Image (spheres, grey):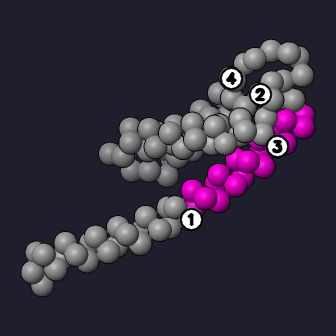
């Protein structure tokens, strides 16, 4: 196999992974919308820093040490996008505060 053929095969694998990632992203965004609706119903703020820290820590458990910084950054961005989706449905907490916005 030539290097160009190897490159083409590897890119094909990346494309397949990308399709899976997008499908998982769509699923996560749908769940984020439902969470936003639920938070609106109970008057909970969109931002939950403790929960986000737990999500990052759990992601690091599943990533290789060499990828920890990138995995944490990836999860932070994913949660930022999820918060934006939630905010479409959520409102400030019933206490009248504006934390999380």
Q: Are marks 4 and 2 in contact (CB under 8 Å)?
A: yes
Q: Earlier in the sequence, mark 2 or mark 3?
A: 3
Residue placed furthest toward the left: 2
Main SS of the magenta segment?
Answer: helix
* 3D distance between C-alphas at marks 1 and 4: 28 Å
Q: Earlier in the sequence, mark 1 or mark 3?
A: 1
- For the C terminus, the quadrant is top right
Q: Label 1: which residue?
A: 23
Secondary element at tag 1 = helix
Secondary element at tag 3 = helix
Judge left or right: residue 74 versus residue 94.
left
Inspect the magenta stretch and tell me whether residue 36 lies in it: yes
Q: Earlier in the sequence, mark 2 or mark 1?
A: 1
Q: Is residue 54 visible?
A: no
Disc 2 residue crowd, few under 14, some 14–19, many 20+, Cα 10 Å = many
* 3D distance between C-alphas at marks 3 and 4: 16 Å
Q: Label 3: which residue?
A: 37
């Amino acid at each position: 196999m030539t290097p160009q053929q190897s490159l083409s095969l590897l890119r094909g694998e990346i494309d397949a992974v990308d399709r899976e990632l997008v499908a998982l992203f769509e699923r996560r965004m749908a769940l984020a919308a439902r969470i936003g609706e639920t938070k609106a119903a109970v008057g909970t703020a969109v931002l939950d820093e403790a929960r986000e820290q737990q999500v990052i820590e759990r992601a690091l458990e599943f990533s290789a040490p060499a990828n920890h910084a990138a995995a944490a950054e990836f999860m932070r961005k994913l949660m930022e996008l999820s918060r934006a989706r939630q905010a479409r449905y959520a409102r400030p907490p019933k206490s009248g505060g504006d934390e999380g916005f």
